[in-house]
Image (tube, rainbow, N blue to C red):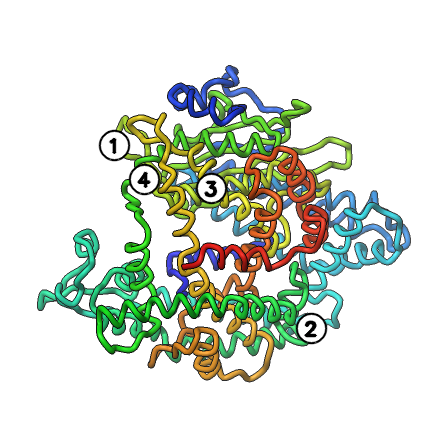
Amino acid sequence: MAESEENSEEMVKRKSESRMLAFTGGAAFLALAVSLVVSAFNSYRNKSKKKDLPRFNVRINLSASEILRLADQVIAKSKEVHDAVASVPLDKVTYANVIAPLADLDGQQFPLVQSCVFPKLVSTSEDVRKASAEAERRIDDHVLTCSLREDVYRVVKAFAAKGECVSPEAKQYIDCLVRDFEKNGLNLTVTKRVEVQRLNAKINDLSLRYIRNLNDHNAHLLFSETELAGLPSEYFKSLDKAENGKYKIKMRSHHVAALLELCKVGTTRKMVAREYGKRCGEVNLSVLDSLVELRHKYARLLGYSNYADYAVHCRMAKMSSKVFDFLEDISACLTDLATRELSVLKDLKKKEEGDSPFGVEDLLYYVKRIEEKQFDLDFAVVRQYFPVDLVLAGIFKITQDLFGLRFQEIADARVWHDAVRLFSVFDLNSGDLIGYFFLDLYAREGKYGHTCVVALQNGALLHNGARQIPVALLISQLQKDNEGESCLLRFSEVVNLFHEFGHVVQHVCNNASFSRFSGLRVDPDFLEIPALVLENWCYESYSLKLISGFHLDITKPIGEEVCKSLKRWRNSFSALKLKQEILYCLFDQIVHSADNVDILELYKHLHPKVMLGLPILEGTNPASCFPRSAIGYEAACYSRIWSEVFATDIFASKFHDNLLNHQVGIQFRKKVLAPGGSKEPIEILSDFLGREPSIQAFIDSKVEHSL
């Protein structure tokens, strides 16, 4: 599974960061579908005109100069607080003069920092976006400086050593403060600390060099139209032609993935897969070798036996050995199913291409061919059943009914574009305001190019007793259809929208006392679990019908047979696909756990072992074009599978038999969403499930929907 170049900058960014309506009743929903689409976002509007919102501290529509001025104010205030904490005599440290000021600073400044930073993602003004990027640079530099302040560390450490009785959440916050300083080497001698910082700088430089090498790689192959048989006319329109009339296939993920999935010519698929897998060859292999060596040195200076143990220690998995056990258990449990899946693919290739051996370059193509034969799914037709307003209304209904929420759109709110909408969120039982969220759904020039949720304001209990509530922003890239027509969503966009709205709910339902543990600031192994749980509603007939309706007559939801096909399609060849992902995760974990690994030989050994005898494609070197091991996910590539496995356990155990079980939904909100990062994830999940989470439901779900 190759990482797309389009995500490379996102990885770089991740490396640098320190930091509706109340509907009830399914039958009533369908009966009133027509009127709901018209009124769904108007019924409970706040009629006030751009008035200040209660407990909303995010600043909207700042000019370029205002952004830079605010950034400087944030930095000045932060320095003032850190200086004050640093000045506390070690024998006079108290919670009130050391910990509370730092916690309050985090809570109060988070929405101000985000006010400076988020415009670079969404503003229509290039000047504002540039100022926002500059503000982020200044703030990041300041955050780095603060993280290296030995005077503040000594004071925090002195308070931690007192062992004063504090709440469990406060104790965890103090431990996090100490750990953050010590991850920068502040508990080491000056000589070792300098070495930690030197290694960190060199690691960052090499990581970026690996990504730049991939981005700068501009190789292509030439093919005639006959050699590209099976590819649609739209694909050919995207290609350049050489002087000899042949088409240029650039070694970019969007060109390669489509070709490997659709091209009927096996020799073409093999040539493209080999060239794509050779990108940056020895140069990036050398970079990765150096990176791994430096990471091990870095980890050992900080007291860990290897880099994998360092990376995993503060995550839900805790130990690299536990990650190995997890991956190998999943792989072993899926071997029989994956073998049957591979046999089906091999049989079809033999029928279509004779005795040509089956290789990894054939996987995408023959999976696609089998799916076309097995599933009566025309995704162009499926799209006609998902007008965006109806999908949103359905998502709103499901999440409100499940979690006891009420969403209310705010009319004439301050926004940065007229297509952006702002909603307040209330607890349905108490009527209390618990948060806000923005929807910025449509693509436009200058806007951030990926779908994501951004926390603009974290929930926190400030030292004066006031409760700061969460504010979230959902950014998407939906393409508006012809003027006056409803935007129709591809099914993948429906799933993405539901997933990201799951993060919105996760953020606004958080009830942690510290901004540090609020909303999306949780263990990375846990972060995706709530959103992945909610994705399941996109594949169940009951909920699919709630979020769908034919665009010319929305009283007609998607058909039952299509719903069943979508669910089967979701699990189609899932064991084989997961085996391929496990291969990369094991590689990532091994190189970051052991010294002097021959990376190329490791791949040659692992590939047939995990992929049921399929050898690595001759001449390729996956380690040279696998960005996740270079930056962003180093020693943590397993995390996505980890999250999916435990999300499946939650859905199968608690929601599968009753999709709108309000009582279970409220328990999920209180026990899983509310704590955020204030409790250990394994404790959170065990409390909700009534037992420790298991891989069995995940394995059962794959086998149940197998071929």
Is residue 195 visible in this depiction of the protein?
Answer: yes
- The local secondary structure at tag 3 comes to loop
Q: Nearer the viewer, mark 4 or mark 2?
A: 4
Q: Which residue is mark 4?
A: 383
Q: Nearer the viewer, mark 1 or mark 2?
A: 1
Specify the label residue 482 is tagged with: 1
Q: Which residue is mark 2?
A: 304
Question: Which type of secondary structure does the marked residue at label 2 adopt?
Answer: loop
Q: Which mark is residue 540?
A: 3
Measure how far apart labels 4 and 2 are at the Cα level. Answer: 51 Å
Circle nearer the N terminus (3, 1): 1
Disc 1 marks a residue whose amino acid type is Asn
Q: Amino acid at mark 2?
A: Tyr
Is residue 269 or residue 130 the one in the foreground? 269
Q: Position of residue 401 (x, y in %)?
A: 57, 30
- On-image quarter of the N terminus: bottom left
